[in-house]
Amino acid sequence: MLKLPAAILSIALMSTTALAQTATGSGNTTAAPAATGAAGLPTIEQMAAFPRIASFSISPDGQHVAALQGDGENRSILIWQADHLDVAPTVINASRMKIRDVSFLKNDVLGVSLFQPFDLNQGGNLIKTFVSKFYLTDLQGRSWYDPMELLNARSEGEADFARLQSPALLDALENDPDDVLVTIGADVYRLDVHRRRGERIQRSGERVIGYQTDLQGALRVRNIADRDGEGLYIATQFRNADGGWDEHLRNHIRERDVFSVVGFAPDPNIAYVISNRGRDRAAIFEYNVASRTLGEVAFEHPLFEATGMWIDRTEGPTFGEIMSFSYAGPRTTEYPIAPDYASLYEGLEQALQITETPLRVTDPADGRQRTIAYPQGRYMRIEAASQDLNLAIVWTGSANDPGAYYLLRNKTDLTLLSRPYPDVRPETLGTTSLEYFKARDGLDIPVFVTRPSEAIYGSGPWPTVILPHGGPWSRDDMDFDGSWWPQLLTSRGYAVIQPQFRGSDGWGRRLWTAGDAEWGQKMQDDLDDSVLWATAQGVAAPDRVAMFGFSYGGYAAMVAGIRPNGLYQCAIAGAGVSDLSRIRSSLFQNPYTREAQRDTVDGLSPVTRAREIQIPMMVFHGDRDQTVQLEQSELFVRGANNSGQPVAYHVLTDYAHGPAWTRETAAEQLGLLESYLRTDCGPGGL
């Protein structure tokens, strides 16, 4: 990479009152007392709170900065003039709904995501859920607009649909001063955000699951989900010169092949695609649309899956230039490629003291090991930027540090903006590393290990919580976890083990497909093997291990309670799947996901053996969960109550499959975990 000139970046503390207040009180680096229960541990209330000031965005012209401010139950939008951050910002509030996110659609138009609880009476049955909406507003928050009005509802049914559904932004059309593209259902609309009117430009059938646009914002690609004689497939179609759609490739889900368009070159005949066809890990290739041929590799990582790319779509000298690629390393990692951007990125890492250290990585595909340089502790992300990159928001932190936001002005001056959790001391949250262990059948399994602070809790082994992720077509990352589950546990003295068990996505095809139809079987073996490994490594204290998981992880916790000769002192199941026969049709609301995963969901159904649990258990579930419905926990608890083991059961009010509606419920969930592990996880607690 090109190096920045010496002293090109300088760090200064902003004098803005509103922002400076969030930065004070958080620079304490004094080591915590070396005693269990030492002062300075984060409180439940601190972890359950909204971030103080976070979620920054920048207008395309760099004239305004937006952020979300948390204050008790309220989240407000703050809007500053970028050149006058010392002036009090405009504050925009919502009344009945809560604000989730804000971004600039145009220089003077915001896109705001909100949600609220909603009760739906369907055929005499009360369905408790949440409704999410995406609105447009001006920078003062005076005039709001729901793009669902584009439907021009002609019946009561269409009006109800418009009221409960929300559009999705397809393309912000950076070079158009007025228009954006949105999808409503599967149809595509062109919306003038200033005149608040638009037209449907693409009508779609039920089989359409998504579109992509080219550099000019034209619809060029659509994906179709359907079945043929070989099963479920995803077809990639390109638009032809006559405006019709031609199928270029058909991938059958059972093969787990991936072929996804992620961008276009200035030459409209060249697309970029992510593909794993004929390989274990996905790479990014050039694709010739005219000849329908896969060309040269544009980007691949020798150990991790390629996940995307950033192409400059702003009119100007770098239009169409590839700025960076990304890959699924220990965390999603940006790899700058454009010389000026790479130089800027390296300068930021130097200024923020981001350092790379040797990391030993094992390839699950073949077991080969390599050592790479990687920032295992502090890392950074460029969160937002103006079109000319002269104003940017940078976040830096770690898996154990909620971090800080900085403003980069004119590519030279770096100013501290906000610490989202200024009262949390990172040194109390332990340290996280990526390691590997061999499963009993020889498969190499990645695992994230978070060790508690030795200054507070001494050296290991420690009481340990196995924390399997949800999905199961998902994965964990070496990121700061917004659920606060790992940080809660490590701050209370528990080591946290997060195995990337077979069936986890993002680590290559071999690990991904090895979990098919192995629910509660080989997938569960991997979790048990992680306990034996962590014990042998001196991390986990023997006979002081629990399992806690949510969603699929909740399913795994239920199975952990059932398995004979288990390794766990107790198990905690959050929103767990207990009946596989019921979940095949209700778990995955997205038709593609439901069809894709349905045939892989097979194995042990915990509800059939709930009365056989052999350890104490806690089960909790949200009363508004429509992803894993409440009956999944109710059925399991009903059987487990006949086991002779103590079973605690909690239904959380106004909680879906996350997040909590109130800070009180968020604190309740964290408090249940803390108190149960401390006092009820077997004799004397964990």
Image: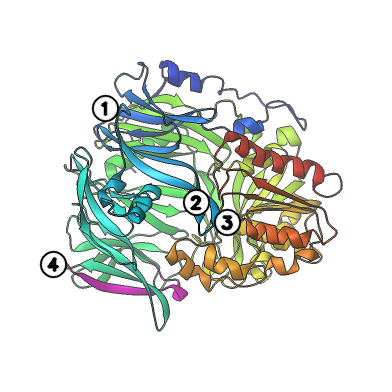
Identify whether 72 is placed above or below 306. above
Q: Are marks 3 and 4 in contact (CB under 8 Å)?
A: no
Q: Secondary structure at mark 1?
A: loop
Picture quarter containing residue 675? top right
Determine which of the numbered discs, if any, sits on residue 63 in the image. 1
Q: Which residues are magenta?
A: 243-258
Q: Earlier in the sequence, mark 3 or mark 2?
A: 2
Asked whether residue 452 is in view, the answer is: no
Tell me the distance, in whole angstroms, between the alpha carbons under discs 3 and 4.
43 Å
Tell me the distance, in whole angstroms, between the alpha carbons under discs 4 and 2.
46 Å
| Residue type, mark 4 in image | Ala
Q: Which residue is mark 4?
A: 241
* Residue shown at the point (41%, 71%) measured from the top left: 257
Determine which of the numbered discs, if any, sits on residue 120 in the image. 2
| Residue type, mark 1 in image | Gln
Q: Which residue is mark 3?
A: 470
Q: Secondary structure at mark 4?
A: loop
Q: Is 654 or 403 nearer to us in this picture?
A: 654
